[in-house]
Image: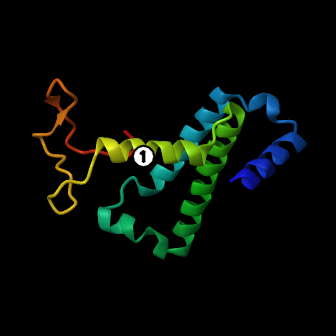
Amino acid sequence: MGELQRRLAEFAAARRWEPYHTPKNLVMALGVEAAELAEIFQWLTPGESARVMEDPGTAGRVADEVADVLAYLLQFCEVLGIDAPAALEAKIERNERRFPVTESGGRVDGGAGETDGLDGAQGKANRHSSE
């Protein structure tokens, strides 16, 4: 990742783009690129979305948008001094503690009866590892 960040920084420096690569601008560009990736999948059925890489044209578009998202994320991390792999590892470790595997065959019940925290408040039905 460090090599990719270095190449991106050199690319921007050669074009004198550093003044524009503020955290605000980079996170906005990241959101735009993520939306462009989402747009490819917007009206697909779940089955169609699972097969999206079978069409070479669409596969190329998906790969390009993934590259754009990753580029802006890496630049954002570089500007703010965030070690992305370390941040991800720390998040995974927190989630492993928050959502332990139960004795129910490895499935953690995320249904309507789940509670969040000590106060017993209703939890979310659909958990995601980024929460």
Residue 106 placed where, x, y %? 22, 60
| Observer-nearest of 47 and 57 | 47
| Observer-nearest of 44 and 21 | 21
Residue 65 placed where, x, y %? 58, 55
Q: Residue at x 85, y 46 (%)?
A: 10
From the viewer's perspective, tell me whether residue 48 is left or right of residue 40. Answer: left
Q: Secondary structure at mark 1?
A: helix
Q: Residue at x 71, y 28 (%)?
A: 22
**Residue type (three-letter) at the residue carrying disc 1:** Glu
Which image quarter holds the C terminus? top left
From the viewer's perspective, tell me whether residue 19 is left or right of residue 114. Answer: right
Q: Quadrant of residue 21?
A: top right
| Observer-nearest of 51 and 27 | 27
Direction right: furthest residue: 14
In this view of the protein, can residue 35 be seen by the observer? no
Q: Quadrant of residue 80?
A: top right
**For mark 1, what is the residue?**
93
User: In this rendering, is residue 50 above or below 75?
Assistant: below
Residue 76 placed where, x, y %? 65, 37
From the viewer's perspective, tell me whether residue 38 is left or right of residue 114. Answer: right
Residue 3 placed where, x, y %? 76, 54
Q: Quadrant of residue 51?
A: bottom left
Direction left: furthest residue: 113
In this view of the protein, can residue 29 be seen by the observer? yes
